[in-house]
Image (tube, rainbow, N blue to C red):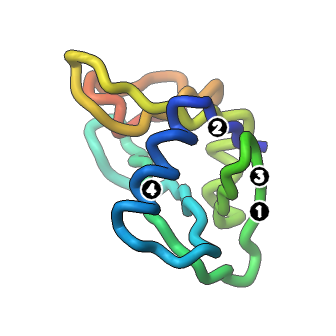
Amino acid sequence: MITVSNAAKEHAVTLIREENKPADTFIRVGVDGGGCSGLMYNLIFDNELKQGDQVFEDNGVKIVVDRKSFLYLVGTELDYSGGLNGKGFVFKNPNASRTCGCGESFSV
């Protein structure tokens, strides 16, 4: 399961509203090869399910993950930081053995 913090929920709802996304919009989270640590997080708004997608809902937010990415993301919390180190969604991934300084890539 992937969980969603209150801060991430509030920011996602705001973005969906500001960007006039359809009512069935969800957050698609994935993992791609690349970045300074070997794997990069990929996060987009989507409203079309694909074969093999894993669907979760937490804190009123629907999260969709492809089967391959889920293996790297199980137990992860999606959070949002608006601090001095930069604004954006943050992944608190218990499976990551190393994370780069910007938090956008990781290794297992």
Mark 1 and mark 4 in contact (Cβ < 8 Å)?
A: no
Residue at the image point whose x is 71% and y is 42% from the top: 2
- Badge 3 is on which residue? 57
Residue at the image point whose x is 52% and y is 73% from the top: 46
- Badge 1 is on which residue? 55
Q: In this image, 39 relative to 66: left or right? A: left
Disc 4 to disc 2, C-alpha distance: 13 Å
- Badge 4 is on which residue? 43
**Quadrant holding the C terminus:** top right
Callout 1 secondary element: strand
Q: Amino acid at mark 4?
A: Leu
Residue 73 pos. (x, y %) = 64, 43
Callout 4 secondary element: strand
Mark 3 and mark 1 in contact (Cβ < 8 Å)?
A: yes
Q: Amino acid at mark 3?
A: Glu
As drawn, the label of residue 4 is: 2
